[in-house]
Amino acid sequence: IRDRSYTVPNDGNVTLSVYDINGRLVENLVNSVQSAGTYNTVWNASSVSSGVYFVKTEVGSVVQNQKIMFIKSPKDLFS
């Protein structure tokens, strides 16, 4: 499980999605209208493999992409 915080500068539609290295959607974490402020969301990554993922955040017309490296810890491998 990975925590992620994000800031919404103005009221509006917010989408936060995780994609794999091939551009396939892994999970939509947020898809709603939100008021301005700072929020936290949780990605339960227990069902995905270690690797490179992209987190796409859309707030109104502003789009941000972030590349992340997810590495399962040894305890995750035996859960």
Image (spheres, helix red, strand yellow):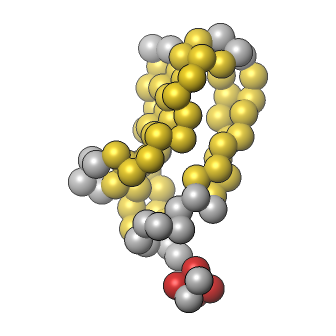
Residue 46 placement (x, y as % from top left): 53, 68
Residue 31 lies, with reference to residue 68, above or below; the image says: above
Q: Is residue 78 visible?
A: yes
- Apparent side of residue 50 relative to residue 24 in the rendered image (left or right): right
Quadrant of the frame with the N terminus: bottom right
Query: Residue 44 lies in what quarter of the image?
Result: bottom right
21 or 32, which lies in front? 32
Left or right: 73 with respect to 15?
Answer: right
Task: Please state which of residues 27 and 39 is positioned toward the viewer in this rendering.
Answer: 27
> Is 7 rendered above or below residue 53?
above
Residue at 24 percent of width and 54 percent of height: 22
Q: Is residue 58 above or below residue 46?
A: above
In the picture, measured across the screen, residue 70 lies left or right of residue 79, that is left
Residue at the image position 52 percent from the left and 85 percent from the top: 77
Q: Residue at x 39, y 51 (%)?
A: 26
Residue 40 spot, x, y in % from top left = 71, 40
Residue 9 visible in the picture: no
Q: Is residue 54 left or right of residue 34?
A: left
In this view, 67 is above or below 61: below
Query: Which image quarter holds the C terminus?
Result: bottom right
The residue shown at (60%, 17%) is 33
Q: Residue furthest left?
A: 22
Residue 42 percent coordinates (x, y) = 64, 50
